[in-house]
Amino acid sequence: GINAEYGMFKLPQFYALGSVLVVVASGGLGLIGVAKPLMSEVFSGAMPGIVTASFASSFILMLSAGNLTGRIAWATLSDKIGRPATFHLFAFGSVAIYASLPTIIQQVIQNQSAGSLMAFCGLSVAAISMFGGVYSILPAYESDLFGTKYVGANHGKMLLFSSTAAILGPSTFLALRSMSEKAAITDLVGKIDPAAFLEKFGSDVSMVDKLVEAKTVTVAKLMEIAPSGVRDPTPFLYDTSFYSIAAAISLGAVAHLMIKPVNPKWYEKVEPTISEIKKD
């Protein structure tokens, strides 16, 4: 095995595998973190009869079931096709899923399609199943790459990337959503009559930044005085988050393609036992 104390941090395979863990886990943790408000903000306006508070709660339960099922199903599949092939599926499959979600959201909003809504839920569950599968298969993959002797210590080192994902995932989703919201407010203000803005909020348009910080101006309130025909940007505030995580995972997928077997020089040298020396 490769000594966790001296060898792991010198191996490019360690960082390549860790990069896949960071991006896939960031996407999964980010999606789980915003699941309930996302469902309400994005779909409740277009399909209020279906997307209720209880439906949003059920969506969280579906994600939890996907996490649990993925840990079992993907581990079983990896025993048949191998850990590298399974991680390729995680990386490239996650890219396809997250990149397609904004298009599916648009279809739901435009067509009020229950089928598209179910597709969104199904793909989200699939993404979370891959998130769970990464954690399920990771120790075995580490054993394949780095040997079995120090697998516990090696896995502890790998969890540094998991901690990074726990911080980056939810915070990135929320930060990108906030940026999208500010951009949407700026766009809406440009389309609204300044006199109507002054009447609604009691302040000039030039004060919009301070009003946004005070939560006085929101997208919903601006839509009340927006000209007819202006599209409500609320359902699309998470699009940037989905595209960004898809781009990040694509980089992780490329890194995973570069993983090669570890050079034997990094493995511990096995000293012969006394009995083996006597036999010689």
Image (cartoon, rainbow, N blue to C red):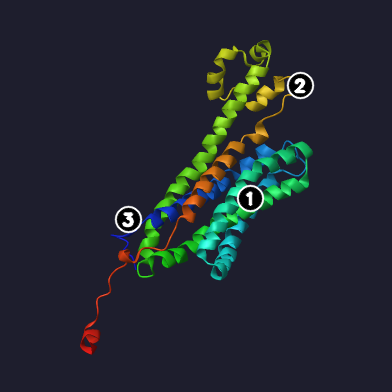
Q: Helix, strand, or loop for circle 3?
A: helix
Residue with the mark numbered 3: 10
Residue with the mark numbered 2: 228
Q: Amino acid at mark 3?
A: Lys
271 or 105: which is nearer to us? Answer: 271
Instruction: Give percent across and percent down for residue 169.
Output: 50, 45
201 or 244: which is nearer to us? Answer: 244
- Answer with mark 2 or mark 1, whichever residue precedes in sequence: 1
Query: What's the distance in space between the residues labelled 3 and 1, CA to CA?
Result: 36 Å
Q: Amino acid at mark 2?
A: Ser
Quarter of the image holding residue 148? bottom left
18 or 70: which is nearer to us? Answer: 18
Is 69 situated above or below 104? below
Mark identifier at residue 124: 1
Q: Are marks 3 and 2 in contact (CB under 8 Å)?
A: no
Instruction: Give percent across and percent down for residue 175.
Output: 52, 35
- Answer with mark 3 or mark 2, whichever residue precedes in sequence: 3
Quarter of the image holding residue 85? bottom right
Q: Is residue 186 visible?
A: yes
Q: Is residue 224 left or right of residue 163?
A: right
Q: Residue at x 65, y 15 (%)?
A: 197
Location of the C terminus by quadrant is bottom left
Q: Amino acid at mark 1?
A: Ser
